[in-house]
Amino acid sequence: MRLDGKRAVVTGAGSGFGAGIARRFSAEGARVVVCDIDGAAAQAVAADIGGIARTTDVSDAASVAALAEATLGDLGRIDILVNNAGITHLPGPLEEIAEDAFDRIFAVNCKSVYLTARAFVPAMKAAGAGAILNIASTAGVSPRPRLNWYNASKGWMITATRAMAVELAPAGVRVNALNPVAGETPLLPSFMGGDTPELRARFLATIPLGRFSTPQDIAAAAVFLCSDEASMITGVALEVDGGRCI
């Protein structure tokens, strides 16, 4: 019960890493607001864990503002914000990625962090406490060819995490990031450009521990960084990658 009594918002929590984080947070005692652009998926996870479902487009200012207003109205405060929602583009030469794909990636992966900070940080500052966790990627540390603009968005997220940590530390708000390696989530086929035994073997060959990450792996690290056990940790981008970035 390391998050007992905490109130948490997790974006992109209808599936994959976000769903794993939401489930683990609930098991550790947190009240979780499950956010996803897919409202039915958010509702399914929330119903399973006794949480609150919110249909949210994290790239849209009005949608994020509505989320913050409803959350603070329902729960009174927010202790933990997890910026997990993210997308990628299909593998391809960097100069051939469509402009609308580029814009969507930076809206969901980067602008969302700005929008949620604008919506939730004032309440955290007022409380003098809070933990923000950004789900970045090993792609922001050790980029994979043909995923250039996704790589760049995750590098932005890591830098934003450190900048936020420095600025918000005097207010008692900690900001950290996780860098997962490719995992068993709905995004995996997009990273690989398909899903075949050959593509999986090629990806796995770059991970020393020899397996993809799982939502449970990421959730375990997320619980630690968002708990009071990590009260002296801020500005960290922790790799959960089976050794890929070594």
Image (tube, grey):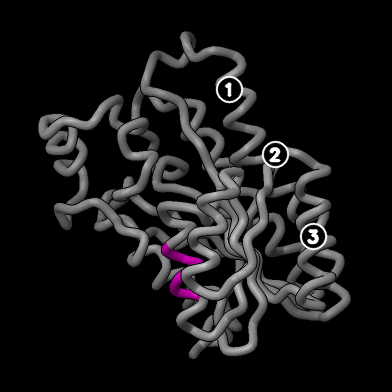
Residue 68, which numbered label? 3
Label 3 residue SS: helix
Q: Are marks 2 and 3 in contact (CB under 8 Å)?
A: no
Q: Residue at x 51, y 88 (%)?
A: 2
Percent from the top left, x then y, of residue 196? 16, 30
Of callouts 2 and 1, which one flags the residue occurring earlier in the amino acid sequence?
2
Q: Residue at x 51, y 77 (%)?
A: 26
Residue 59, which numbered label? 2
User: How many badges with numbers are in the image?
Assistant: 3
Q: Amino acid at mark 2?
A: Ser
- Residue 27 in view here: yes
Q: Amino acid at mark 1?
A: Phe
Q: Amino acid at mark 3?
A: Ala
- Residue 135 in view here: no
Q: Residues within 10 Å of mark 1 (few under 14, many from 20)?
A: some
Of callouts 1 and 3, which one flags the residue occurring earlier in the amino acid sequence?
3
Q: Are marks 2 and 1 in contact (CB under 8 Å)?
A: no
Of callouts 2 and 3, which one flags the residue occurring earlier in the amino acid sequence?
2
> Which stretch did the figure color magenta?
20-25
**Side of 159 relative to 225 (left or right):** right
Label 1 residue SS: helix
Is 229 in front, or is 80?
Answer: 80
Viewer-nearest of discs 2 and 1: 2
Q: Is residue 60 magenta?
A: no
Spatial CA span between label 2 and label 1: 13 Å
Residue at label 1? 102
Percent from the top left, x then y, of residue 139? 41, 41
